[in-house]
Amino acid sequence: MKAISLTIISVVAALSLVGLGAASASGASASGGAMVSTARTGLGRIIVDGRGHTLYLFERDRRGHSACSGTCAVYWPPLLTHAKPMATGGAKQSLLGTIRRGDGTRQVTYAGHPLYRYIADTKRGQTRGEGSHQFGGGWDALSPAGRKIERDG
């Protein structure tokens, strides 16, 4: 596993302290709804947020409940929204939904999977989190059909 810079963690912590929601930091629409799109990467076509950052599922999540909070959510920030999430660029609106997290915020789901970004994916199209096993479970990118993508090899 690649080391994660304390500077990046500090920035995420600072953003949460000043009250900037993840929806605004992830390319929300003017209505406050998170944007979900697709992008072509080395993994093929995957689901990304409004800024082009890869979105992941966490294998420990069950029945519309996120198993990632606290420190896990610092490294794997959930995609939050303040309004109905919007699909663009090949993502399917019919597969978008939301769940309520333990802290009362709304997390975007795709094909029933709560969505997360990875703190080490700092640029569009990066997939550093693919295949990771952290916080007791695996992390995988999603195809536009809502299936997890597993890297060969």
Image: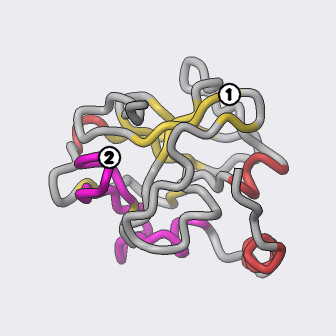
What residue do we see at 59% from left, 56% from top? 118
**Residue 117: percent from left, percent from top:** 55, 55
Q: Is 21 on the left or on the right of 123, as rendered?
A: right
Q: Is residue 17 placed above or below 87 in the rendered structure?
A: below
For residue 60, side relative to residue 34 (left or right) = right
Query: Where does the C terminus fall, quadrant-wise?
Result: top left
Which residue is at 83% across, 48% downward?
70
Q: Residue at x 61, y 26 (%)?
A: 61
Please tell me whether residue 76 belongs to the stretch shown in magenta. Answer: no
Q: Say which of 63 and 38 sits in front.
A: 38
Position of residue 16 in the picture relative to residue 35 (left or right): right
Q: Nearer the viewer, residue 33 or 142?
A: 142
Q: Amino acid at mark 1?
A: Gly
Residue 150 image position (x, y, % from top left)? 41, 31
> Who's the residue at 79% across and 80% down the image?
7
Q: Is residue 95 above or below residue 62?
A: below
Residue sitting nearer the eye, 111 or 128 = 128
Query: What range of the chain is rendered magenta?
Result: 22-48
Q: CA distance from mark 2 to mark 1?
A: 20 Å
Give amino acid for label 2: Leu
* Mark 1 lies on residue: 137
Residue 33 appears anywhere in the view: no
Q: Magenta segment: does it hold 39?
A: yes
Mark identifier at residue 43: 2
**Residue 41 drawn at (x, y percent):** 29, 57
Taking depth in this image into account, of 86 and 69 the one nearest to the observer is 69
The picture places residue 83, in percent across and down from the top left corner, at 44, 58
* Mark 2 or mark 1, earlier in chain: 2
> Relative to 104, is 10 above or below?
below
Q: How was this image coloured?
A: secondary structure
Q: Residues within 10 Å of mark 2 (few under 14, many from 20)?
A: some
